[in-house]
């Protein structure tokens, strides 16, 4: 099942149709669907799709050669290439007069087995490939490697790439297409557990109930998802135990650097280094109030991935019981009733994604240039205040409150939002209130009289972007 990625597919085809040499760099975290995206793009195209493995250089070249020669029907007539240069030169000759897509998937493994690989490709682009119709795609799952070794100005490939794509998880509105038969509330629950990673979404059976999937796919020691975070951390990091402790600390509510370092028993300087690595992996995010300057110290850390957030808040603490095959009992008696604790922040994320989609379609009162959260002091009431979503434009501001409760929202929610908005408002203000369960008559009546107030339900958001 292929879902979403319309922008990426359209842009890749646009570049492909230019009928000239391209060097595309595609990267993103593991399981996010890069290979599936490229497979979809390559359909009905003349292509060689090479997936590198953890081999030594000789075996890598042998497998690469075999795939090239087989593609051109020459595997029975030619031996393997004696060098990477020879292989790329051969490809260049074949792409002189006809378009050819060459995908180098899991590219970091190629570099690991041959430290000169980046320079080899750079030299071949400059001398053998630049005037051909080759559509070269370099793809990798190590975000830090791609950003530091392929895209940076220090890389041999600097100046050779013609486009780059960072592949992020699907947003809520694409992720829920895997579960068309689920209720809207269950769609929020699915997203709050699995996020937008296609490989995780595919583990759940859309024909079975949400609770059945949770027991069988999350709280069973044989399930694919049960060990996923542990295996990924071991694969990506040298000392996964410390990183796991940081994720658990943030999942439990520690959001400031000193709080996190205290919980894990490390100095703030060491903790800061570990957190930087988790930010590069897109597991942790660093945020500050939207109105703060870039160098502001008013910073907090949150888990950036719903799957990690859920796992380290609601699964990892029960490992012992799950290993004893008590997962169903744990889910039904210790987790199921606490979903609302987890869903509030996820609902905010969904509302933000809704506004971003509306912004792209020019369906908001103004163009939002920057979107985020705000928190700060209320000097009159001497307390901290928070606004769930703030969008800034050219002299306008959008302010949003998001409530995932079973009760309808009344006029007091609007009044509180306006009060908080006065702490930072600059220019004309527009108010959005998002609700899972709808609105009371007094707030619905108010919306009719106030031009800059918009009330949005969960059902409305989903219906607007249903396909």
Image (cartoon, rainbow, N blue to C red):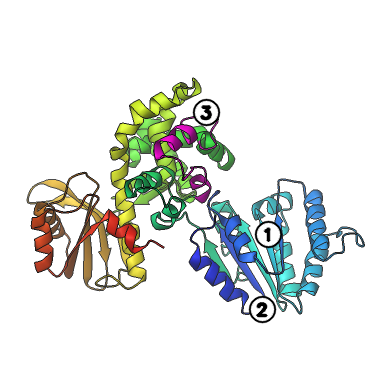
* Residue 134 as seen in the image, left or right of residue 405: right
Residue 220 locus on image (x, y percent) = 49, 29
* First reached walking from the N terminus: tag 3 or tag 2: 2
Residue 361 screen position, x and y as percent: 35, 71
Query: Which residue matches tag 2?
Result: 20
User: Residue 104's mark?
Assistant: 1
Q: Which label sits on residue 281?
A: none
Q: Residue at x 79, y 63 (%)?
A: 71
Where residue 202 appears, as percent x and y from the top left, is 52, 46
| CA gap, disc 3 and disc 2 | 51 Å
Q: Are marks 1 and 2 in contact (CB under 8 Å)?
A: no
Magenta region includes residue 203:
yes
Q: Are marks 3 and 1 in contact (CB under 8 Å)?
A: no
Q: Earlier in the sequence, mark 1 or mark 2?
A: 2
Quarter containing the N terminus? bottom right
Q: Is residue 156 visible?
A: no
How many neighbours does mark 3 have within 10 angstroms: few (below 14), some (14-19), or many (20 or more)? some
Q: Earlier in the sequence, mark 3 or mark 1?
A: 1
Which residue carries the number 3 mark?
A: 221
**Magenta segment includes 366:** no
Residue 79 position within the rendered picture, expressed as x and y whole percent measured from the top left? 90, 58
| Residue 124 in view in this figure | yes
Label 1, residues with CA under 10 Å away: few <14, some 14-19, many ≥20: many
Stretch in magenta: 198-225
Which secondary structure lies at badge 3?
A: loop
Residue 442 left/right relative to 215? left
């Amino acid at each position: 099942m292929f879902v979403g990625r319309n922008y990426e597919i359209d842009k890749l085809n646009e570049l492909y149709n230019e009928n000239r040499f391209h060097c595309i760099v595609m990267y993103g975290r593991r399981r996010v669907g890069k290979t599936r995206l490229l497979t979809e793009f390559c359909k009905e195209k003349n292509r060689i799709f090479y997936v590198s493995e953890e081999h030594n250089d000789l075996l890598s070249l042998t497998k690469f050669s075999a795939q090239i020669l087989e593609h051109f029907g020459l595997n029975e007539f030619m031996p393997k290439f004696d060098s990477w240069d020879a292989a790329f030169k051969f490809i260049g000759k074949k792409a002189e007069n006809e378009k050819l897509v060459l995908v180098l998937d899991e590219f970091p493994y190629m570099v690991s087995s041959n430290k000169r690989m980046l320079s080899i490709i750079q030299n071949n682009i400059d001398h053998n490939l630049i005037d051909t119709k080759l559509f070269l795609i370099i793809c990798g799952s190590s975000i830090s490697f791609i950003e530091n070794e392929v895209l940076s100005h220090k890389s041999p490939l600097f100046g050779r790439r013609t486009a780059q794509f960072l592949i992020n998880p699907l947003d809520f509105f694409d992720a829920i297409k895997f579960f068309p038969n689920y209720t809207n509330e269950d769609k929020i629950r699915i997203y709050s557990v699995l996020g937008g990673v296609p490989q995780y979404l595919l583990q759940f059976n859309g024909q079975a109930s949400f609770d059945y999937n949770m027991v069988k796919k999350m709280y069973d020691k044989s399930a694919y998802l049960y060990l996923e975070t542990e295996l990924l951390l071991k694969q990506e990091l040298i000392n996964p135990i410390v990183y796991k402790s940081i994720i658990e600390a943030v999942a439990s509510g520690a959001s400031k650097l000193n709080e996190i370092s205290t919980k894990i028993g490390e100095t703030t300087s060491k903790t800061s280094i570990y957190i930087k690595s988790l930010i590069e992996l897109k597991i942790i995010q660093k945020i500050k109030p939207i109105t703060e300057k870039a160098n502001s110290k008013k910073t907090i850390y949150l888990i950036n991935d719903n799957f990690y957030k859920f796992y380290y808040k609601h699964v990892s603490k029960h490992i012992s019981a799950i290993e004893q095959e008590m997962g169903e009992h744990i889910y039904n008696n210790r987790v199921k009733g606490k979903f609302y604790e987890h869903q509030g922040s996820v609902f905010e994320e969904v509302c933000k994604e809704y506004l971003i989609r509306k912004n792209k379609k020019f369906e908001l009162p103004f163009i939002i240039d920057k979107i985020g959260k705000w928190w700060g002091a209320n000097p009159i009431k001497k307390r901290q205040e928070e606004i769930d979503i703030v969008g800034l434009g050219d002299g306008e501001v959008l302010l949003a409150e998001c409530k995932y409760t079973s009760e309808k929202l009344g006029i007091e929610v609007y009044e509180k939002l306006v009060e908080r908005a006065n702490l930072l408002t600059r220019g004309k203000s527009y108010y959005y209130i998002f609700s899972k369960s709808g609105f009371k008559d007094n707030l619905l009546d108010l919306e009719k009289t106030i031009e800059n107030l918009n009330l949005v339900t969960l059902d409305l958001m989903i219906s607007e972007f249903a396909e």
